[in-house]
């Protein structure tokens, strides 16, 4: 199997359809989640919606690079999103999240293996492979937070703001 196909499938696993590492994925956790739970704050933690938007922000930004564009995302803006106010806004966001995630995987799949070892935008950012693998690892990190926050809210085990 091509390395790029293997990495693309690892990415799909965490966002869209896998259970190998975490026994769940973003789509499994968010697809049928009531938007009110997604935006419920717990103390000073990020909401589920903000964490999902944060991961989407990076996917969308890297997609732009993979399509030949510039790297326009900045860490300092990666948690700045408008508040979701309705079920429709939540569903619209999720549809975009799934679409952009699949596009990310397809763009990786279409890459040749040699591209993985090339510099990502600028040498200071490491290789394409490093950035794609970091996206996967970063996604697992925040998925764990989403799972815990969801359990706290659903089981009402925490004081809300």
Image (cartoon, grey):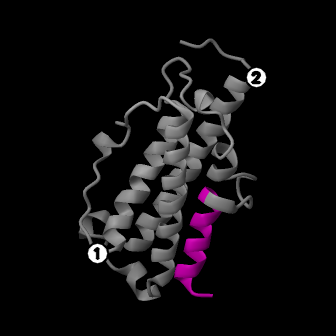
The answer to whether mark 1 and mark 2 are in CB contact below 8 A is no
Question: What x and y, as percent, mark residue 109?
Answer: 51, 80
- In percent of width and height, residue 49 lies at 52, 36
Q: Position of residue 31 (x, y in %)?
A: 65, 47
What residue is drawn where x is 71% and y is 30%?
151
Tell me: residue 141, above or below residue 18.
above
Residue 37, position as x, y percentages in the image: 62, 28
Q: Which residue is mark 1?
A: 68
| Quarter occupied by residue 77 | top left
Q: Looking at the image, is 63 positioned above or below residue 46?
A: below
The answer to which image quadrant residue 12 occupies is: bottom right
Q: Is tag 1's residue or tag 2's residue first in the polypeptide sequence? A: 1
Q: Residue at x 47, y 83 (%)?
A: 110
Q: Which residues are magenta?
A: 1-15
At x 51%, y 61%, the residue is 99
Residue 61, picture quadrant = bottom left
SS at mark 2 in the image: loop
24 left or right of 127 in image? right
| Residue 155 numbered mark, or none | 2
Above or below, 68 against 161 in this view is: below
**Residue 72 among those drawn in magenta:** no
């Amino acid at each position: 199997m091509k390395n790029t196909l293997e990495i693309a499938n690892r990415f799909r696993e965490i966002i869209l359809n896998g259970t190998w590492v975490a026994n769940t994925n973003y789509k499994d956790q968010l697809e049928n989640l009531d938007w009110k739970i997604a935006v419920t704050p717990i103390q000073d933690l990020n909401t589920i919606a903000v964490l999902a938007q944060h991961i989407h922000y990076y996917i969308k930004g890297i997609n732009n690079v993979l399509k030949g564009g510039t790297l326009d995302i900045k860490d300092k803006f990666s948690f700045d999103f408008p508040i979701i106010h309705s079920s429709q806004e939540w569903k619209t966001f999720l549809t975009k999240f799934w679409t952009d995630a699949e596009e990310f995987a397809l763009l990786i799949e279409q890459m040749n293996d040699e591209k993985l070892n090339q510099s990502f935008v600028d040498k200071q950012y490491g290789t394409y492979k490093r950035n794609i693998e970091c996206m996967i690892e970063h996604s697992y990190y925040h998925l764990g937070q989403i799972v815990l926050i969801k359990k706290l809210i659903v089981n009402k085990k925490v004081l809300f703001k």
